[in-house]
């Protein structure tokens, strides 16, 4: 590593630990316990990680010793660990938290204020509320360790700068928004220390159900951790800024900070986009001034999608900030050469650079070469040693930069937050749509109640009609639900209920598709199979806001059960699949009994004696067959099904069993069992066909038992999925097909002609049994309630 850079880095770490302007402890502050004094090592130290009990132990000690910190348990995690938030501010502010919560609540809803003068008064009194979330993705482990160092600095430093920060802000610090994952990763790291697997990802999902997708749940609110944070944000604290601290691949920039790439979602208030750029530019400037190389803006990440921890705040009039530091091998140092940076990985290993492979070289959107200087990347990192302490130092400085800015422009952040709410109310009053109507009669009443509940849980107001009314020439009875657009969280309601129209974006005109950061369309009622109507004109109705009690009653009634009596085995690979986790979640919620089926049990055979149905979740052929690399992982977690497992599955089906395959697993089955089915999309370039995550219309064969109880057509979720051509109709029967017309319902579909009319779901005979081939994921992220019934019918 460059000596000047090393010296500057060491100085930066020292300054961050002691305080950027020479912290002198005030009386009593010298008793504040440091992380080292509690843990026995420094956060960020090579090959040392604190587990969740150590982290919670440190925050408990800090709470007991400091009058600047109060730690609160919000509830329990999925696996029953304590879920914590540390509230950090000046002692005076902490003694008056209820007052500041009330100020935030009233600024968040301008209808509660009589005048702008009253708003001005609250803005003068209020504090900038900053939420900082660490390590929601648990292999991005350093932020959870950094949280202790950040809390210690905030609790112990007595510089004028820090006193101003504490006086003018209230910080909601989450040491991790995935505590279970902190332990899963830390335990695996300790277990594999000194072996080839040191620094690898664990052979299980690092969230029990969702894995990496725990940051894809912020409008559906399936996970208990998501619900705990959402309640704190939008029912209690209403933060002006939410900062989500992440890591990315190792062979790219050293840190990404905003601004983001295009396209922005049209529902985000323009001032919020400007504030995002302001904060990110301040972070980048401070990092550069401190001597950090390799800081990039405007790469990979965009502001189109709703469902992430840092994107959901945009639709609640808050600023969402993301930073992504380059990863080490968990806490193990990594040496990276310039050649490896240019190539995107080590020779002979899978390329790790983020981004979708398209025609030509693999590149990161916005940063084709991390060695090439650009305006948004003015000081490339040349390579060298990369450690957890480097990541920690950058994250500490980025957090401090945010807090300084929030202190300096406190009134501006509060005023912009308030004004965004006012603009939302005005837009709801003067522009269509004026409301979304959820009719009383629904094909799936459970799904409608669920949708209403999750809208309300994130602060969206839902009303119920107390008398009949008419909208746009159509009459609706009492009991109809209405989401009025004249509300402060209009953007949230509209972004979830409207149709998304993602722009046709290419790497160059006529060239490969430019990949969105996540998905292109997600319209909630379409995913959930809920009928709704857009109100395009003003209307009069006698409406009553649903109370918390009514919503609790909805939730209690919404305990669905799938009547599945078959003996179900759910394949669970050690090359952990998020789709498997979401399938487990759906089965658990709908009370479907199942057994997790591991590789060794499949290879042993005799499956028909134990199971009627085996489910293969979405997973690549390579992972299903080979599992994790045996050169890295211990033998007990690196095998895969192998040809023995394929033979055993064939025997299971031929003996009368049913094999249900989702998406990529269907491609595996077609090849493994030589089924007379072809993937109609095979070989197409992204310049010809591309669907990155969108809702498509699927027409059902009403004569097949898998479609029982469903309407003639449903909306299905397609994310780089499959379409089939049936080559032998005697052996394979079509269950559903992609619509010939009106195929795209929400999102982005490039190359409709390749998909329209092709088979979406097929039933293949094999001996006495069946193989059910889903070209899409009917339980995608546990969001697609509208196609769950296809799964349950396939299990019967």
Image (cartoon, rainbow, N blue to C red):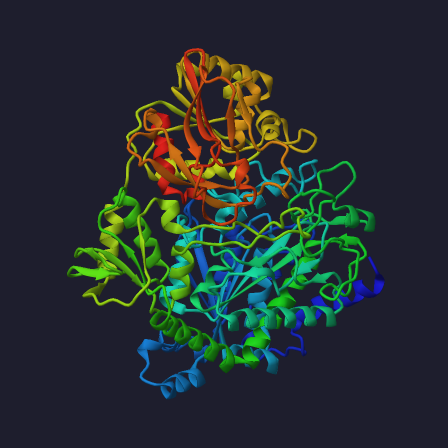
Judged from this view, the residue extending furthest toward the left is 467
Res. 765 in view: yes
Q: Position of residue 252 (x, y in %)?
A: 72, 53
Judged from this view, the residue extending furthest toward the right is 3
In this view, 364 is above or below 63: above
Of 447 and 281, which appears nearest the observer? 447
Q: Position of residue 43 (x, y in %)?
A: 63, 58
- The picture quadrant where one finds residue 403 is bottom right
Tally the numbered discs: 0
In this view, 795 is above or below 349: above
Q: Is residue 728 left or right of residue 353?
A: left
In this view, 115 is above or below 491: below
Q: Position of residue 455 (x, y in %)?
A: 34, 57
- Who's the residue at 36% across and 45% down the image? 528
**Which quadrant is the C terminus positioned in?**
top left
Q: Is residue 295 left or right of residue 604?
A: right
- The picture quadrant where one finds residue 391 is bottom right
- Who's the residue at 56% across and 56% down the image? 144
Of 148 and 486, which appears nearest the observer? 486
Q: Is residue 567 left or right of residue 9?
A: left
């Amino acid at each position: 590593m460059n000596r000047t850079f090393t010296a500057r880095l060491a100085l930066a770490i020292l300054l961050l630990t002691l305080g950027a302007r020479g912290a002198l402890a005030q009386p009593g502050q010298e008793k504040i316990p440091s992380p080292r004094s509690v843990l026995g090592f420094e956060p960020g130290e090579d090959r040392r990680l604190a587990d969740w009990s150590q982290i919670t132990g440190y925050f408990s000690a800090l709470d007991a010793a400091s009058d600047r910190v109060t730690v609160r348990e919000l509830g329990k995690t999925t696996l029953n660990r304590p879920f914590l938030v540390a509230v950090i501010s000046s002692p005076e502010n902490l003694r008056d938290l209820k007052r500041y919560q009330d100020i935030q609540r009233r600024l968040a809803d301008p209808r509660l204020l009589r005048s702008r003068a009253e708003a001005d008064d609250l803005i003068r009194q209020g504090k900038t509320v900053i939420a900082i979330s660490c390590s929601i993705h648990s292999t991005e482990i350093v932020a959870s360790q950094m949280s202790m160092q950040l809390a210690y600095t905030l609790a112990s430093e007595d510089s004028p700068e820090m006193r101003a920060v504490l006086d003018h802000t209230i910080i909601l610090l989450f040491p991790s928004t995935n505590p279970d994952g902190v332990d899963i990763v830390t335990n695996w790291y300790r277990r594999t220390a000194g072996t080839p697997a040191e620094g690898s990802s664990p052979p299980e999902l690092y969230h029990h159900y969702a894995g990496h997708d725990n940051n894809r749940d912020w409008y559906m609110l399936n996970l208990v951790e998501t619900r705990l944070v959402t309640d704190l944000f939008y029912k209690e604290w209403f933060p002006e800024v939410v900062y989500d601290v992440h890591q990315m691949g190792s062979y790219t920039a050293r840190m990404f900070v905003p601004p983001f790439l295009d396209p922005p979602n049209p529902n985000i208030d323009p001032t919020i986009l400007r504030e995002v750029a302001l904060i990110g530019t301040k972070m980048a400037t401070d990092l550069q001034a401190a001597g950090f190389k390799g800081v990039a803006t405007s790469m990979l990440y965009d502001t189109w999608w709703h469902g992430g921890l840092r994107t959901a705040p945009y639709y609640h009039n808050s600023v969402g900030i993301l930073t992504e530091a380059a990863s080490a091998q968990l806490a193990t140092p990594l040496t990276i050469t310039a050649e490896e940076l240019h190539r995107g990985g080590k020779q002979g290993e899978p390329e790790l650079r983020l981004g979708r492979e398209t025609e030509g070289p693999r590149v990161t959107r916005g940063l084709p070469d991390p060695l090439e200087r650009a305006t948004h990347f003015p000081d490339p990192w040349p390579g060298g040693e990369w450690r957890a302490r480097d990541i920690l130092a950058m994250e500490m400085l980025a957090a401090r930069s945010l807090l300084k800015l929030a202190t300096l422009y406190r009134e501006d952040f509060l005023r912009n937050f308030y004004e965004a709410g006012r603009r939302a109310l005005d837009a709801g009053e003067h522009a269509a749509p004026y409301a979304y109507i959820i009719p009383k009669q629904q094909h799936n009443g459970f799904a409608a109640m669920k949708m209403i509940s999750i809208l309300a849980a994130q602060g969206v107001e839902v009303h119920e009609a107390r008398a009949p009314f008419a909208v746009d020439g159509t009459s609706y009875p009492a009991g109809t639900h209405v989401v009025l657009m004249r509300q402060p969280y209009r953007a949230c309601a509209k972004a979830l209920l409207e149709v998304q129209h993602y722009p046709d974006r290419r790497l160059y005109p006529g060239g490969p598709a430019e990949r969105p950061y996540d998905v292109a369309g997600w319209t909630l009622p379409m995913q959930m199979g809920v009928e709704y109507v857009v109100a395009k004109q003003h209307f009069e109705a006698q409406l009553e806001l649903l109370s918390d009690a009514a919503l609790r009653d909805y939730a209690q009634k919404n305990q669905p059960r799938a009547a599945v009596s078959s003996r179900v085995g759910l394949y669970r690979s050690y090359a952990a699949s998020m789709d498997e986790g979401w399938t487990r979640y759906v089965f658990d919620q709908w009370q479907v009994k199942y057994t997790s089926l591991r590789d060794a049990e499949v290879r042993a055979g005799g499956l028909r004696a134990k199971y009627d149905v085996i489910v293969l979740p979405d997973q690549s052929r390579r992972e299903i067959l080979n599992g994790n690399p045996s050169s890295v992982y211990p033998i007990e977690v690196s095998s895969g099904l192998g040809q023995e497992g394929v033979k055993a599955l064939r025997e299971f089906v031929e003996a009368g069993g049913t094999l249900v395959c989702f998406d990529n697993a269907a491609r595996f089955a077609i090849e493994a069992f030589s089924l007379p089915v072809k993937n109609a999309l095979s070989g197409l370039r992204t310049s010809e066909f591309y669907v990155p995550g969108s809702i498509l219309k699927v027409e059902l064969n009403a004569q097949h038992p898998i479609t029982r109880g469903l309407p003639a057509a449903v909306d299905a979720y397609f994310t780089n999925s499959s379409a089939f051509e049936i080559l032998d109709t005697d052996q394979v029967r079509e269950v559903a097909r992609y619509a010939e017309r009106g195929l795209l319902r929400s999102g982005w579909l490039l190359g409709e002609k390749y998909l329209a009319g092709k088979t979406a779901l097929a039933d293949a005979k094999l001996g006495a049994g069946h193989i059910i081939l889903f070209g899409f994921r009917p339980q995608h992220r546990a969001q697609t309630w509208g196609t769950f019934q296809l799964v349950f019918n396939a299990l019967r």
